[in-house]
Image (cartoon, rainbow, N blue to C red):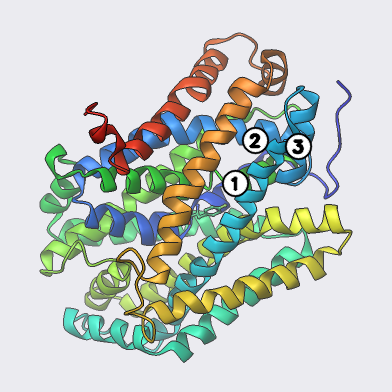
Amino acid sequence: MAKRSSLHGLWSSRLAFIFAVSGSAVGLGNIWKFPYVAGANGGGAFVLFYLLCVACVGLPIMISEVLIGRRGRRNPIATMRLVGEEENSHPSWGLVGAMGIVAGFLILSFYSVIAGWSLAYVINSAAGQFAGGAPEKVSSLFASLLGDWQTMALWHTLFMSLTIWVVARGVERGLETAVRFLMPALAILMLVLLAYSIRMGDFGRGIEFLFKADFSALTAEGMLAAMGQAFFTLSVGMGAIMAYGAYLPEGTSITGTSVSVVIADTLVALLAGLVIFPIVFANGLDPAAGPGLIFETLPVAFGQMAGGTFFATLFFLLLTFAAWTSAIGLIEPAVAWSVESHGQSRARSALIIGVVIWLLGFLTIFSFNEMADVKLFGRTVFENLDHLTSNIMLPLGGLLISVFAGWAMCKNSTAEELDVGTSFTYRAWRFLARWVAPVAVLLVFLQATGLLNAAGLL
Ligand code: PFF
């Protein structure tokens, strides 16, 4: 088959692609979300189920996204439609790409607000506000940020502006260099924090909480949250990785690259858990504290350690960078679509789409103050947005993507793209994509809606 070329240029090297995809994967999902969702769902069993989902569902879907993306070389909607047509399938596969674009919009609207908290913490840390690290003081500082919608709006606005700016400049000139240096720096800083947690935290209890699986503590809701977290943290199920795959040069190993990214992403999440829970237990804090967990625990550690002001400032700065490189992945599919389908310039597309997302972000801001009591299904607007995207849209998108790659695309096409012939790797991927990933997502959905119980199956 004649190969298509991308309209937005290609990554300069395999390494550039790895940095871009891991930049998208490693973000607030690992450091902010993983600990608090694990904490809220009882720890051990949740973590084990999450790891299982990462390996057996997330990884094959990531590989599927990259291969579909590279074959189609367009934005996710056009790619799914084009590849679908080539494979004599229905063009309505493009709708999967459309759902992903919507998911990206919704996720970025709250992601940017949380990244704004991180930005606010850069300033708070630099001003030495966490000195001493008394847990009550740290908690009350966080509470005052949540109560102040104007300050939150300010940081959200700054973060969205940074995102729009870098996306407007284009893929290759984007954050490649930043990712190359700042991600390793973040990892090193996490290791410094780990050393603190081992020495000063209740490390034994932290490990036990994180790794001792008590399956009676894992509810159907918890399983859904663990699966959702696997999708969210790997950035899969919404076409972000597909959009990046569209810029991948031929001849780069898709499976090898995906495995490295998945391992790196998982290690960062586990590291965050290992840092946070020992601090939580040593200071009598609540592991189920919710979205504020890292903002209420890490400053306690920083406040108590030598050079804490410096480390805290650096940490929140690097966390903001990690969020920034992920935010780009969230908006890229929509921007690529606008450029390709509407002939808009990159800059104009990024601006218009970014402003819409920025406005949507106010719903999340108000969820923590003015609209904290506005609840639907017992959840605030922010909680609904998070639940709808992470736990429903991404897994559903992922299910459809794996069915597309495993069933709608013929064996020759996927084997050609993966370039691993009929090897064990290829067969393992195909089995996971055809059977394991779709069935697992379906079972977790049925379980969470209580349908499995109702049918007397569990
Ligand atoms: N994976 C990112 C994180 O863990 O923070 C979040 C994310 C980025 C999800 C990009 C989806 C996406 F397309």
At x 71%, y 41%, the residue is 94
Numbered label attached to residue 66: 2
Q: Do the residues labelled 3 and 2 touch (CB within 8 Å)?
A: no
Q: In which quarter of the image is residue 49?
A: top left
Find out if the beta carbon at label 2 lies less than 8 Å from the nearest ligand 1 atom.
no
10 Å crowding of disc 2: few (<14), some (14-19), many (20+): many
The residue beneath circle 1 is 21
Residue 121 location in percent, x, y? Answer: 41, 79
Horizontal placement of 377 versus 178: left or right? left
Residue 88 location in percent, x, y? Answer: 77, 22
10 Å crowding of disc 3: few (<14), some (14-19), many (20+): many
Q: Can residue 17 be seen in this view?
A: no
Horizontal placement of 434 versus 246: left or right? left
Amino acid tagged 2: Val
Q: Do the residues labelled 1 and 2 touch (CB within 8 Å)?
A: yes
* Element assignment for label 1: helix
**Quadrant of the image containing the N terminus:** top right
Asked if 439 appears above or below 426 in the picture, the reply is: below
Horizontal placement of 162 versus 147: left or right? right
The residue beneath circle 3 is 81
At x 57%, y 16%, the residue is 426
Asked if 49 appears above or below 189 in the picture, the reply is: above
* Element assignment for label 2: helix
* Element assignment for label 3: helix
Asked if 3 appears above or below 431 in the picture, the reply is: below
